[in-house]
Amino acid sequence: MNKDGLEQAQARFMRINRAAGMIASSAPVKEREAAWLDIIAAFGTLYSKLEQASKATPEATRWFREKKETRKQDPLLQYMHHARNADEHTLVRVATGAQFAVKAVVAEGGGTLGVAYDAAGRPFMVSEGMANPKLYENEVMLHTAIDRGVSYQPPTMHMGQHIADTTARAIAPLIVAYAERLLQDASGFLVVDEP
């Protein structure tokens, strides 16, 4: 693993981590939306830097090839790759900061979904025949990423584990944890210069 390339990948990780902190904060939703787009871009660049850095040794090259294959198979990593492409090369929004959003799965036979307000003016869900209705306030909602005509839905699985919520707030920590493990693994292939 090339040291300079690894350091550049680590710098991208710092951007990812900083942006994840912004997403977890109570900052205005538009700022958190921008932070999510920063994560998408920096995560893609982190992969590119590691790919170039891994060319320093055959072992690192094999390791990165395996990681690239994992990215093709894992729904979250695949989504991140194609969301970056869609954000970079199209006009399709891959996320939107929403003041208010409703999400549910239509059950077999259809159903109704609505929002009502309690006496204090707080919204709550009213649904019949809908599975997993959720109400979101001031969240960054992930959208389908369309890359080269193929649609990639926000992920519901990562490394064999179910992802319960597909907001940026829920996904960002998963990206931070994966990127951190990736860099730890990569550092094991570091080429040490002889004195």
Image (cartoon, grey):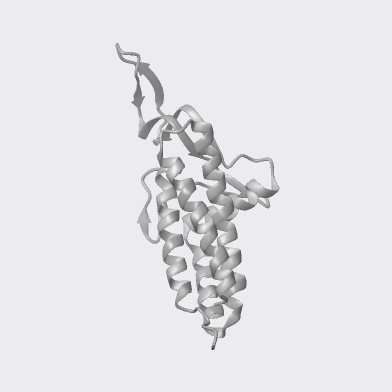
Return the residue nearer the eye: 62 or 42.
Answer: 42
Q: Is residue 125 left or right of residue 65?
A: left
In the picture, the quarter occupied by the C terminus is bottom right
User: Residue farthest to the top?
Assistant: 119
Residue positioned most to the bottom: 194
**In the current view of this chain or complex, which residue is farthest to the front?**
195
Residue 98 lies, in percent from the top left, at 50, 30
User: Quarter of the image containing the N terminus?
Assistant: bottom right
Task: Indicate the position of residue 17 as horizontal and vertical percent values.
Answer: 46, 52
- Front residue of this view, candidates 173 and 69: 173
In front of the other: 12 or 165: 12
Residue at 43% across / 60% down in the picture?
178
Report whether residue 175 is seen.
Answer: yes
Tell me which residue sits at (51%, 74%) in the image.
Answer: 66
Res 112 quadrant in image:
top left
Picture coordinates of residue 121, whole percent (x, y): 35, 14
Q: How many labels does the image show?
A: 0
Q: Quadrant of residue 94?
A: top right
| One can see residue 167 in this view | no
Q: In this view, does 72 lie above or below 61?
A: above
Q: Outermost residue, left direction?
A: 119
